[in-house]
Image: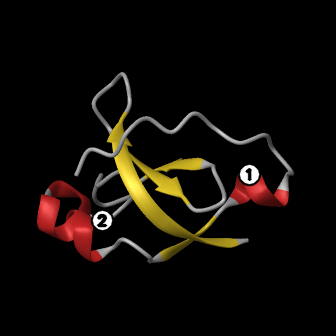
Amino acid sequence: MLQPITGYHRDEDDHWVAQLGCGHNQHVRHDPPWQNRDWVTTAKGRAQMLGYKLDCKKCDEDAPIDHQPRDHH
């Protein structure tokens, strides 16, 4: 199910995690050649992706919502 990015935080390994409007979190790593998301490496890039919709597998599985710490842009 497509859900908009509403914010970001870093996990315990310092990777960026998108916070989605549905209450779930999803990692947004830039790890070429497997994942090419260079936008996540800058505050401007992350800000430009706010509202962008990601496919939330947790919604498809009816998973409980995740803890979403205060935004870190």
Residue at x 66%, y 59% (from the top left corner) = 22
User: Residue 59's x, y, as percent?
Assistant: 77, 58
Q: Is residue 16 at least partly visible in the picture?
A: no
Q: Which residue is mark 1?
A: 58
Q: Nearer the viewer, residue 5 or 31?
A: 5
Q: Is residue 67 above or below residue 21?
A: above
Q: Is residue 70 above or below residue 73?
A: above
Horizontal side, residue 26 vs residue 28: left or right: right
Label 1 element class:
helix
The outermost residue toward the top is: 12
User: Residue 23's x, y, as percent?
Assistant: 63, 51
What distance separates the C-alpha of mark 2 from that of mark 1? 21 Å
Write down the quadrant of residue 45 in the picture: bottom left
Q: 10 Å neighbourhood of mark 1: few (<14), some, or many (≥20)?
A: some
Q: Is residue 72 at least partly visible in the picture?
A: yes
The outermost residue toward the right is: 62
Write down the quadrant of residue 69 in the picture: top left
Name the quarter where the N terminus is drawn: bottom right
User: Residue 66's x, y, as percent?
Assistant: 63, 38
The outermost residue toward the front is: 70
Counting labels gives 2
Residue at x 30%, y 52% (from the top left corner) = 31
Instruction: Tell whether label 1 touches label 2 (CB within 8 Å).
Output: no
Q: Which residue is mark 2?
A: 37
Q: Is residue 7 above or below residue 69?
A: below
Residue at x 72%, y 57% (from the top left corner) = 57
Q: Earlier in the sequence, mark 2 or mark 1?
A: 2
Write down the quadrant of residue 15 in the picture: top left
Q: Amino acid at mark 2?
A: Arg
Label 2 element class:
loop
